[in-house]
Amino acid sequence: MTPDLSRLLRPKSIALFGGGWAVNVVAQLKKSGFDGEIWPVNPKRADILGVPCLASIDELPGAPDASFIGVNRDATIEVVERLSAMGAGGATCFASGFLESETETAGGADLQARLIKAAGDMPILGPNCYGLINYLDNVTLWPDQHGGMPVETGVAIVAQSSNIAINMTMQARGVPIAYVIAAGNQAQTGASDIAAALLEDDRVTAIGLYLEGFGDIRALETFAAKARLKGKPVIAIKIGRSDKARAATMTHTASLAGNAAAGSALLTRLGIIEVETIAVFLETLKLLHTLGPLPGASVCSVSCSGGEASLMADLSGGSSLEFSEFAAPQRAALKAELGPIVTIANPLDYHTFIWGDVPRMTRVFSTVMAESFDLTVFILDMPRADRCDPSGYQCAVDAIIAAKAGTGARVAVLASLPENMSDHFTREFMDGGVAVLHGMGEGIAAIAAAIAAGRFETTEPAPLLLASGAVGSSSILSEAASKDALSEFGLRIPRSFEVRSIDEMLEEMAALSFPVVLKGVGLAHKSEAGLVALNICDEPSLIDEAKKMQAATPEFLVEEMAVGGIAELLVGITRDPTGTFLLTLGAGGVLTELLADTVSLLLPATRTDIETALKRLKIGRLLEGYRGKPAADMGALTDAVLAICAYAEALAGRLVELEVNPLIARAGDAIAVDALIRLNDAEHNKETTP
């Protein structure tokens, strides 16, 4: 259940505990014009910046709605316990030295457990947390400077880094920030709970999350569903994308996927737009605040320079932006206004023939906006006011705002360099309902993110499959055992047998038909070790190959060779540290790492999810039938992937990782010719293999 943070986020009374940091909070509250009660508690001071101090917590005139606790970690626990007992609305815990420092300082985990117990039902932010800023109601429970200003509506930002939160408030991009909340180490109240509470404020238009970790996955799912229901878009930065993939992994899948893929798949599944930089994060939030998610990808770019038009087209290459052509009547109307020299194309370079003629500029811009583009973008860099006179550009400002007012179109102005759009002009445009984007690269990325936000389905995905318990000691099933286990869930595998000698192999060969494949048993990556021989067509050749392998392996696996393959695929499932299970589909076989052609999903995955993912692969063209070649049986291929997923769901309590590579797609079926599974040992988990 989402905790009630209403009193903490929108307090009428604030208590402060501590010395210098509490002084800073009082200074910020007075500066912001907070009109509620301020109750500093400090036995060593008569007042703080003119606000009378109370000698102890017992002298508080009532239970405060919010508190800032800026004392040491042991004293923090005592204060939290007292506040909770008196029915306070919530507190921010500034002190560090709790669980986040357990590796350096003994006892941090125990202190955090005591803090949670002391808080009881009273919500707390942190510890190791700066606090919160509410620019809607002039609440600055914050012990440092910040760069925001009061707003009537705006975006809310929840950050797991207080420094990053401070930096975001200092932006000069015109982003209307309604809330900034530092989550700290989330001992009790997680970032998802905070974000869910912010959704309840109708003045909040969009949510931005700066995440170092996902925390409670179920809470994140609940928040995402709530955001979807309320129609409020969510943007996120998840740091840690550069982490090295897991070391000493058994499968290609784990080395290809890493943690970043699971994080991205999680955000995508929940309808949260992921971006990579703070600049794009802020630009996207601003665009969504002003215009909301874009209903489509059709964009018109308008500028008075061929260079700007070309750069816009070039930088948009590979993105989701689509520069649709003008309709014939629209083209004719633009031609009549702009004359024979101007080429009517999208991106549009309207030259400077109409510059300074506001009525004519307004007609041209209105004509462009009248077409059903999802977004019209004007490339416009303003002269710097300290060295130049920007008044000559006011004509463009007036014409864009007038055309926007007359057509009701979705309109943005994009400065090719972030510094070339002053705060003055940014606010003038945004007051006229025109979004302002700072920087061409950042602006294009923000537009693409807004397009993605408009494409997310409103239906709620199935709850994620989560592992129970930690990964303990684990064991690897042999290839034969792995394939047998998967075949019980419907995966098609070749006929095969395992033997310990060449003589035993020859005795068993009557059960198989040539051609066959010979494999050495006992290594995960057999091809790299030279322990795979393909397309063996007779017994003498089989004996020769077995003798070559004898020095490296005591056992052999012989199986009928799957012929008629159209494409080889990798299907892998890895258990992520978040507890989710990442399904990786990609180009398989010996070129898996070289091609790195993969798509990732989280379990459970539907048939539609899998079919869509397979089509996104580069080898998807092979599956569809390439240059006259037969197409793969996509139904059978999808069934094979679903069978592998069914095994993972049944063994979720024990599964660490599995890989089928390759899964051979054929015209009439799909067959798995190699597989490996790693499971938690049974003594570490009550679940057992069925």
Image (tube, rainbow, N blue to C red):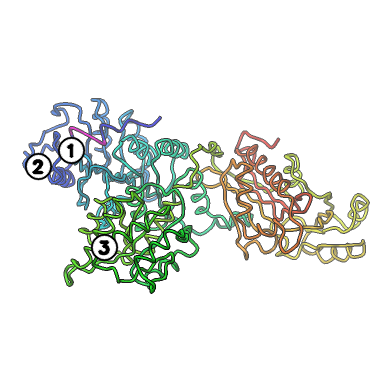
Q: Nearer the viewer, residue 245 or 305?
A: 305
Confirm or deny contact between disc 3 and disc 1 (CB under 8 A): no
Magenta residue span: 9-13
Report the residue marked by disc 2. Answer: 48
Residue drawn where x is 71% and y is 51% of the image = 675
Q: Nearer the viewer, residue 679 or 216?
A: 216
In percent of width and height, residue 37 lies at 14, 33
In percent of width and height, residue 425 lies at 22, 59
Query: Amino acid under label 2?
Result: Ile
Q: CA distance from mark 3 to mark 1?
A: 50 Å
Q: Nearer the viewer, residue 117 or 92?
A: 92
Query: Amino acid under label 3?
Result: Ala
Q: CA distance from mark 2 to mark 1?
A: 10 Å
Element under disc 1 = strand
Report the residue marked by disc 3. Answer: 396
Residue 459 falls inside the magenta stretch: no
Report the residue marked by disc 1. Answer: 16
The secondary structure that dominates the magenta segment is loop
Q: Nearer the viewer, residue 217 or 595?
A: 595
Residue 165 visible within the image: yes
Figure quadrant of the N terminus: top left
Residue drawn where x is 24% and y is 50% of the image = 431
In percent of width and height, residue 214 lies at 44, 45
Mark 3 and mark 1 lie on one chain; the one further toward the N terminus is: 1
User: In the picture, residue 443 is in which quadrant?
Assistant: bottom left
Confirm or deny contact between disc 2 and disc 1 (CB under 8 A): yes
Q: Give the answer, above or below, for where 607 lies relative to 420.
A: above
Mark 2 and mark 1 lie on one chain; the one further toward the N terminus is: 1
